[in-house]
Image (cartoon, rainbow, N blue to C red):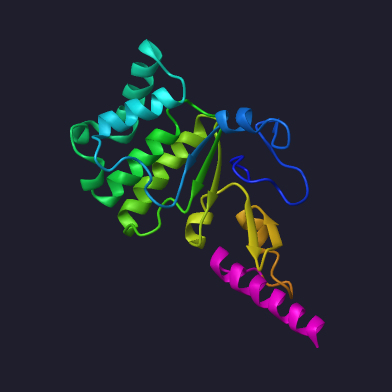
């Protein structure tokens, strides 16, 4: 819905000030999106993929070259430019997908479980890149099942069974555990909040 590909069933949504009910195309142009599954062209080289995506975002000439060079340098893609994207290691695929998503320097970046399936070292490296992008002023929205990753975020929204059960900074969520106990980690707070929701729903059903 936030990518403008599906119509919200209720409520209202905006992306970078663009109302999704009347300005979906403008909203899509204002965001970068990296899906969980690698979705670039496996048979094209890294360089060709970046050039294609840049063109799709309307970048041409010097602007296109500058954007591609910036992404290559920032994400360390230089050694892989002539390699077919489908043959890249998973960690490099993730970097390529991230680079493609930010070629047009969008004000908003959506990352759908960006480190799913990669090892801890690659995850840590990838979050270094995410934090660098956020530090330059881009609003980054990350979906993740890893609570240690969520610790990197300024704000966290916990959703379970299609319901929002908590939101706030990681520190606020650790202090939101019922009973006045401060959870030792965001993961511990997460399980406590989920358990509280389960007991509430079971009580309502009874």
* Above or below, 85 relative to 37: above
Residue 160 on the magenta span:
no
The residue most toward the top is 62
* Above or below, 50 relative to 163: above
Q: Is residue 131 left or right of residue 201?
A: left
User: Looking at the image, which is closer to me, 84 or 69?
Assistant: 84
Say which residue appears at 24% left-offset and 49% top-offset.
89
| Majority secondary structure in the magenta region | helix
Say which residue appears at 49% left-offset and 46% top-offset.
111
Q: Is residue 42 left or right of residue 152?
A: left
Asked where in the image residue 45 lies, by quadrant, the reply is top left
Image quadrant occupied by the C terminus: bottom right
- Residue 124: x %, y % from top left: 37, 51
Say which residue appears at 62% left-offset and 43% top-offset.
2
- Residue 49: x %, y % from top left: 31, 32
Residue 194 on the magenta span:
yes
- Residue 4: x %, y % from top left: 62, 39
* Above or below, 72 relative to 91: above
Any part of residue 192 in sight: yes
- Range of residues picked out in magenta: 182-206
Any part of residue 185 in sight: no
Q: Is residue 47 left or right of residue 107?
A: left
């Amino acid at each position: 819905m936030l990518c403008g590909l599906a119509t919200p069933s209720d409520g209202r949504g905006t992306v970078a000030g663009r109302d999704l009910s009347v300005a979906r195309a403008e909203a899509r142009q204002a965001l970068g999106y990296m899906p969980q599954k690698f979705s670039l062209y496996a048979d094209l080289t890294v360089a060709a993929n970046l050039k294609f995506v840049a063109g799709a975002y309307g970048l041409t000439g010097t602007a296109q070259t500058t954007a591609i060079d910036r992404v290559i340098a920032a994400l360390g893609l230089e050694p892989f430019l002539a390699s077919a994207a489908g043959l890249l290691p998973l960690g490099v695929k993730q970097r390529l997908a991230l680079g493609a998503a930010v070629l047009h320097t969008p004000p908003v970046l959506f990352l759908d479980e960006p480190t799913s399936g990669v090892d801890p070292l690659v995850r840590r490296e990838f979050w270094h890149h995410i934090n660098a992008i956020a530090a330059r002023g881009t609003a980054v929205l990350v979906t993740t099942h890893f609570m240690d990753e969520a610790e990197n975020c300024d704000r966290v929204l916990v959703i379970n069974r299609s319901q929002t059960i908590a939101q706030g900074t990681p520190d606020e969520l650790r202090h939101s555990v019922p009973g006045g106990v401060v959870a030792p980690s965001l993961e511990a707070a997460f399980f406590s909040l989920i358990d509280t929701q389960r007991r509430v729903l079971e009580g309502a059903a009874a």
